[in-house]
Image: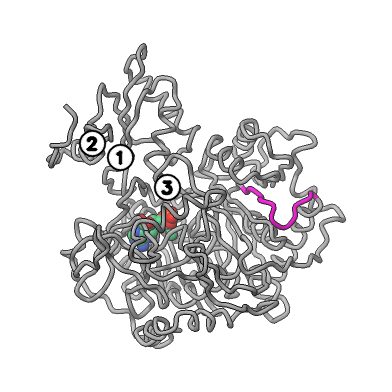
Amino acid sequence: MSDEAFAPAVSEWYAPPESIVQQAHIQDYAALYDRARADVTAFWAEQAATLEWHRPWDTVLDDSQAPFFKWFVGARTNIVHNALDRHVKTWKRNKLALIWEGEPGDKVTMSYWRLWQEVNRFANVLKSMGVRKGDRVTIYMGRIPEIIIAMLACAKLGAPHSVVYGGFSEQALADRIEDARSRVLITCDGAWLRGKVVPLKDVVDEAIHRSPIVEHVIVVKRTGQPIKMEQGRDYWYHELMSLPIASRQCDTEIVDAEDPLFILYTSGTTGKPKGVLHTHGGYQVYTSTTLKWAFDIKEEDRYWCAADPGWITGHSYIVYAPLILGATSILYEGAPNFPYPDRWWRIIEEYGVTILYTAPTAIRGLMRFGENWPARRDLSSLRLLGSVGEPINPEAWRWYHKNIGKERCPVIDTWWQTETGGFMITPLPSATRPFPGIEADIVDEEGNSVPPGVDGNLVIKQPWPAMLRTVYGDPERYVQQYWSRYQQHGWWYLTGDSARKDHDGYYWIIGRNDDVLKVSGYRLGTAEVESGLVSHPAVAEAAVIGVPDEVKGNAIYAYCILRNGFVASAALVDELKHHIRHEVGPIAVPEKIELVVSLPKTRSGKIMRRVLKARAQGLPEGDISTLEE
Ligand code: PRX
């Protein structure tokens, strides 16, 4: 559990049930952690050896060009070989890889064999469209099996995918297409959400209008509503898949361990999103080890990560790690409360889900409907619960533990980031600490470790296999953003989070201490929303802050100064909200937009967000001696 206001006060102790502990993969966390610490490269080499490689590595960790660290240098591999190809040679070919349910209630199940074939067929289609190793392919889809097929097909060819979450708008998509320079885009006609169609293809058309470098668009028919198909550019997925070219045999491109697997854009402290780059080798080792140990995945599990494949949680823990481990995953297309607030609990009952992994914002959202909804469903199959994305407040933790886990299931609160690729600080079913091989610390501005109970900057002092390798196309930003803060001490990775340790040595994450917001678990830069607002002709200047919100964690408040000639009105506020919806996406629409005549600034012209935040909450403004007259 972690929460700013509660962290020091909460001292409840929940031991995992004996039955879970006895069967856990990891029995002695401390010994394992110490062993990893004593020889971190030997430790990761040992984990890597559980996978198949086409050529072994010469060096586990190459730090000669730090902070551009390289892992498993010299090794040849492909993550898809470990996720699919090797399984279909064993009895696992018959095991379910995926159980999918659409929001309207349609269902698909896929064995490893079937998924492997679909991926082969689609990889052949992509090849026929000229996709080769190194080409970036943008994917913009809903939560349907084809998004997983598309990602794996790209990876199979060694073509890095760039998945853009379906909640982003045309401008955000256009920026990401442009940055990745994608010539091929995969999408669907629409996605079901709360009984309505989200018109994804319309967004694609507008995005390509703004970034006209896309040559081919492949469209999965999901909802069947009419869309525009541009001749010579747009192709139906099902038509391509019925051509002889879509054969079931496709060799996996064997790549270097350090070849790019995907780019995933995430928000930083400037308006421009960063393309976080991950590679095949280290990422496959790290994601599979973390999932196996933290969630204690077993052959018979039915594992449900309720995130979207479009975020890092989905990449690592819906797509890659579960498949590498040969697990059975659930994927659900729609909203948790559609048509009724027990949709998730019904899914758990129907499929016998054993592990549920979700975000505090979803728990808080479902909590509002009361405990009768989960009480009416049989949730006895569950044995472990996970949480991710933002601090889970004690209320939500207790509700989740009691009403969903029935006080039997450990709650595994995993702290990590798009950049880290996998869990960094997480309980194993027997401890709450950094993952073995991860050297975390909490330090003050000078870099001194702070004592228990004191807030500081969370840093990682040792590289790990699934770390981001660079910011795509912007290596300077990579160095500047993540590695320069404490350079006098060595290569410490700056997480951007503040945290504190308690007297038991457990970590409590407090939240971001930069200009990044977590809103309903989504990561957004204040600068991103601000530049969206300023791109409207009426807005001269904008400041955006996050204000604590019971369900969303943070709500976005925006303050705008209008340009001369524009008059403040409720209609203008609505128009600005509409504008943000199209510039960034529905997830970035401010809860509140206030049109103001001035903003609190320092004498050097920096907006004092701290003052805005205090004002928004009716709190004392603190030291305002640096405030401009
Ligand atoms: O502030 C931390 C918060 O989410 C940030 C990373 O966001 P993103 O890259 O979108 O990845 C989210 C999914 C891995 C972190 O800097 N965060 C993530 N997990 C937790 C968390 N805060 C508290 N507790 C967590 N378990």
The answer for how far apart the CA atoms under marks 3 and 1 are is: 14 Å
Count of numbered tags: 3
- Mark 1 vs 2: CB contact within 8 A: yes
Q: Position of residue 462 (x, y in %)?
A: 41, 71
Given residues 575 and 399, the one toward you in this image is 575
Q: In the image, which is nearer the foreground, mark 3 or mark 1?
A: 3
Residue 372 sits inside the magenta stretch: no
Is 312 displayed left or right of 374 in the figure?
right
To which residue does mark 1 refer?
A: 545
At a point 42% along the width and 64% down the height, the residue shown is 377
To which residue does mark 2 refer?
A: 612
Given residues 77 and 291, the one toward you in this image is 77
Q: Position of residue 40 (x, y in %)?
A: 45, 80
User: Mark 1: which secondary structure?
Assistant: strand
Ligand 1: give its quadrant. bottom left
To which residue does mark 3 refer?
A: 268
Quadrant in which the N terminus appears: bottom left
Q: Main secondary structure of the magenta part?
A: loop
At a point 30% along the width and 43% down the height, the residue shown is 546
Q: Which residues are magenta?
A: 129-139
Q: Is residue 616 above or below residue 52?
A: above
At a point 36% along the width and 51% down the height, the residue shown is 365
Q: Position of residue 465 (x, y in %)?
A: 51, 70
Query: Which amino acid type corresponds to the residue marked 2 in the rendered image?
Result: Leu
Query: Which amino acid type corresponds to the residue marked 3 in the rendered image?
Result: Gly
